[in-house]
Amino acid sequence: MDEETAVAGTRPYHHGNLRAALLAEAERILERDGIQALTLRAAARAAGVSHTAPKNHFGDLTGLLSELAAVGFHRFGAALAAAMAAAGDDPRARTKAMGRAYVGFARANPGLFALMFRSERLDAQRPALRDGIDAARRALRAAAFARAPVKTLPPLEMAAQAVALWSLVHGFAVLLLDGRLDGMLKSLPGDENAASLLEAVLATVRVGE
Amino acid sequence: MDEETAVAGTRPYHHGNLRAALLAEAERILERDGIQALTLRAAARAAGVSHTAPKNHFGDLTGLLSELAAVGFHRFGAALAAAMAAAGDDPRARTKAMGRAYVGFARANPGLFALMFRSERLDAQRPALRDGIDAARRALRAAAFARAPVKTLPPLEMAAQAVALWSLVHGFAVLLLDGRLDGMLKSLPGDENAASLLEAVLATVRVGE
DNA sequence: CCCCCTATATTGACGCTGGCAACATGAGCC
DNA sequence: GGCTCATGTTGCCAGCGTCAATATAGGGGG
């Protein structure tokens, strides 16, 4: 609660690194209190600045949310890329690694993940957000298309394989975060949990023809 | 803009069927202007009543949204049930019919579908919402478990088959509504569209062992 | 070295929202 | 025929996003 500069006595008029501080506070609020609590004024309060200070850096609320989502997409893409780099060459192993990394990121950053796919509150035209989405899509495509069979398929079937895998893991992540799988998880025997259910779901994927 | 009773001269103090009228106006606003435009006051204005009239019927905004989501879940469950009734007995045909009905509902009611799965703005304890979710889940389970193979699988694999199909169609619907598949759809040749992509995605599903 | 220009931050205001309390109306039941 | 209480209205408050006007100070050009 106390200002960090209380010992020094006076708070500088200029923050120094307000943009990064606002993004950090915004993410903290998002994960702690949910997306509806993430307001411009709340982020400004958390950073210890006046309620219109964020305007200089983000313009409006959509701007702040979009920049935060961009950070999320970059981290998401990096997590996917790291998992694929560690997965080796076996198509089945790569598919499972991608699914684990995708759902793992969503579970580790539920608020951020929800924000990233709440497009009505984001401005897809923002360069930072375009970049972030592009980075994540490249990482995802590297994972998804690696499992295509050697023999070339028609474009529609090729796209369908990638979209099917993406839909499967994204749907699982969304339903899990929304608590929609809780009933099913509780009805499973013994020590089965979300992770083992994901493994079993990934095992149903038909990979490489 | 003019009140409907302008010709009659006076508007009755009591609406008569305000609850249903508010739900209808709320859905219209939701589909026309998006979820962020759906406010208690906007619904009240559209229904031609004062800004606190909705309180008598729904309590607060969460109440209105929850009741509207409940209507959506009931319609969703009915649509799924109707599609399954018309699908016959072939497991593959049933799977495809379920996927078409699921995504078809989402595309026909994008705002309502988004609201139904925006759990942080809903009150899952509301009896009406519980009932609606339950009805939809029963319809969905009838579709998903009908494709289970004759020979019994372990519970985890059984659940995984149902969850995989649900995740696939739900993820596809969410990504499609969010515009996440637009780039891929545009890169497809000729007259391929979302419907044919969905067919190709459903064709990748391994059904009945 | 100093001064000014401009990025950064503040103050104050407006209309919108959800929600509460007090009050008005009238439909239906006894 | 009168009363009760569900239904609807008016008025108010705090919090929100956003804008305009103002204050501050850091850093580059004289």
Image (cartoon, coloured by chain):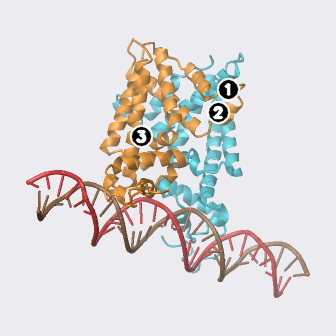
Chain colours: A cyan, B orange, C red, D brown
User: Do we see residue A136 in this rendering?
Assistant: yes
Quick one: label 3, few (<14), some, or many (20+) residues within 10 Å?
few
Q: Is the residue marked by circle 2 packed among few (<14), some (14-19), or many (20+) residues within 10 Å?
A: many
> Tag 3: residue type?
Gly
Q: Nearer the viewer, mark 1 or mark 2?
A: 1
Write down the chain letter for disc 1.
A
Q: Residue A179 got which mark? A: 3
Which type of secondary structure does the marked residue at label 1 adopt?
helix
Q: Which residue is at the front of the view, A45 or A199?
A: A45
Q: Nearer the viewer, mark 1 or mark 3?
A: 3
Q: Earlier in the sequence, mark 1 or mark 2?
A: 2
Q: Are marks 1 and 2 in contact (CB under 8 Å)?
A: yes
**Along the line of sight, the residue nearer the viewer: B159 or A85:** B159
Residue drawn at 62 percent across, 52 percent down: A66
Residue labelled with disc 2: A84
Residue type marked 1? Ala
Q: Which mark is residue A146?
A: 1
Q: CA distance from mark 2 to mark 3?
A: 28 Å
Does dot 3 land on a helix, a strand or a loop?
Answer: loop
The location of residue B178, given as percent across then percent down, is 58, 40
